[in-house]
């Protein structure tokens, strides 16, 4: 039986909030089976608790934010969510003392290292998967995204379309059969990116105040401004895929199916997982027992093998 996972011990970190520009502290704590991914705003009295779900995502402007009915929020959760998906962590308490998570280096890799340091623990409860049974599609202008049935595992096929001298048209499409090792090696280090022309607008609206060349890829009208250049030659599309992986994991369950999208973003990703879960005929919640369906879980077994990740560091 594929089991649910949490971490073995608490671990903490500090960083800068991407939009606030303020110092933020975050602590990850173990959680019991069927707890899910839970955020706690410890700077508020009483503490505000956010149980992660697609419906809790009520703001997708420049990030993915969980927002309560009264407007209390915790923002920029998508990179951590992608790391949790890659490690197969189903249950976790995340304490944060601000309205957003620290952006770290703008990718998912620092979160993977933190969680790997805490260790992964299997719980005595079956892991739950969302198995896609029929194609679900959402569209917005010329953008679209689909979840399709698949025999096993989780695959992604994403194309972006930016007209910029530094964005090679041949490097705006990426496909992968999702696994922890492939995500760690090929996607996890892809950073968020922005255009210099948009920075002034964002600052005027009190956004991206903590953004810098240390936590984002910045482009002017002609080139990448960061002196070290790109981490991957196709870093832009890989970061969009990283975002999609995180956004789809807002359900707290790994997917068995295929994600195919064109010019998708946080809003469309959230629309898609909501549309899937709104159609009772489109999915099934399954647990994987050893035996006839074991092949379905092969990639997820790999995803949660923390001892394996050490070999790729």
Image: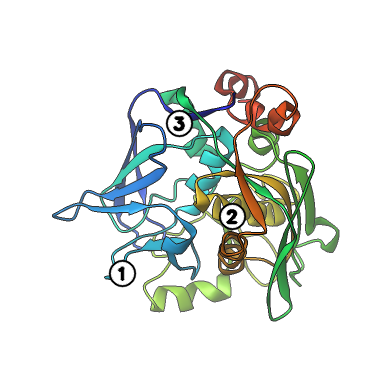
Q: Outermost residue, left direction?
A: 45
Query: Which is more toward the observer, 193 or 297?
Result: 297
Q: Which residue is mark 1?
A: 69
Q: Which residue is mark 2?
A: 243
Q: Which residue is mark 3?
A: 115
Helix, strand or loop for disc 2: helix
Mark 1 surroundings: few (<14), some (14-19) or many (≥20) residues within 10 A: few
Residue drawn where x is 41% and y is 32% of the image: 33
Q: Outermost residue, front direction?
A: 281
The quarter of the displayed image where residue 183 is located: top right
Helix, strand or loop for disc 3: helix
Q: Is residue 223 above or below residue 4?
A: below
Estimate the spatial distance between the alpha carbons at disc 2 and disc 3, rounded to whole Å. Answer: 18 Å
Q: Are marks 2 and 1 in contact (CB under 8 Å)?
A: no
Query: Which is more toward the observer, 203 or 249?
Result: 249
Q: Outermost residue, bottom direction?
A: 141
- Is residue 34 visible in this depiction of the protein? yes
Q: Position of residue 90 (x, y in %)?
A: 48, 37
Nearest to N terminus: mark 2 or mark 1: 1
Q: Are marks 1 and 3 in contact (CB under 8 Å)?
A: no
Q: Position of residue 22 (x, y in %)?
A: 30, 56
- Residue 169 tag number: none
Estimate the spatial distance between the alpha carbons at disc 2 and disc 1, rounded to whole Å. Answer: 24 Å
Estimate the spatial distance between the alpha carbons at disc 1 and disc 3, rounded to whole Å. Answer: 30 Å
Residue drawn where x is 76% and y is 72% of the image: 163
Nearest to N terminus: mark 2 or mark 3: 3
Mark in the foreground, 2 or 1: 1
Residue drawn where x is 62% and y is 20% of the image: 308
Q: Could you tell whether 194 is left or right of 89 in the image?
A: right
- Is residue 227 visible in this depiction of the protein? no
Q: Position of residue 135 (x, y in %)?
A: 75, 61
């Amino acid at each position: 039986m594929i089991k649910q996972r949490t971490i073995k011990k608490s671990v903490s970190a500090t960083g800068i909030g991407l939009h606030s520009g303020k110092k933020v502290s975050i602590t990850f704590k173990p959680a019991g089976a069927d707890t899910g991914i839970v955020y706690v705003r410890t700077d508020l009295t009483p503490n505000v608790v956010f149980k992660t779900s697609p419906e809790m995502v009520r703001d997708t402007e420049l990030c993915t934010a969980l927002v309560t009915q009264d407007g209390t929020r915790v923002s920029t959760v998508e990179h951590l969510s992608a790391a949790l998906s890659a490690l197969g962590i189903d249950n976790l308490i995340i304490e944060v003392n601000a309205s957003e998570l620290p952006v770290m280096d703008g990718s998912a890799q620092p979160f993977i290292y933190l969680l790997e340091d805490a260790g992964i623990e299997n719980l005595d409860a079956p892991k739950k998967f969302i198995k896609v049974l029929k194609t679900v599609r959402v569209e917005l202008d010329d953008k679209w995204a689909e979840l399709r049935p698949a025999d096993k595992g989780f695959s992604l096929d994403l194309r972006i379309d930016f007209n910029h001298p530094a964005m090679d048209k041949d490097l705006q499409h990426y496909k992968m059969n999702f696994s922890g090792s492939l995500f760690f090696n090929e996607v996890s280090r892809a950073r968020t990116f922005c255009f210099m022309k948009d920075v002034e607008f964002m600052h005027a609206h009190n956004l991206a105040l903590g953004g810098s060349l240390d936590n984002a890829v910045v482009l002017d009208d002609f080139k990448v401004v960061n002196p070290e250049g790109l981490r991957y030659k196709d870093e832009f599309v890989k970061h969009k895929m990283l975002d999609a992986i995180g956004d789809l994991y807002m359900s707290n369950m790994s997917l068995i199916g295929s994600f195919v999208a064109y010019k998708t973003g946080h809003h469309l990703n959230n629309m898609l997982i909501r549309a899937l879960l709104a159609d009772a005929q489109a999915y099934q919640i399954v647990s994987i027992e050893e035996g006839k369906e074991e092949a379905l879980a092969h990639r997820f077994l790999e995803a949660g093998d923390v001892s394996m990740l050490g070999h790729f560091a």
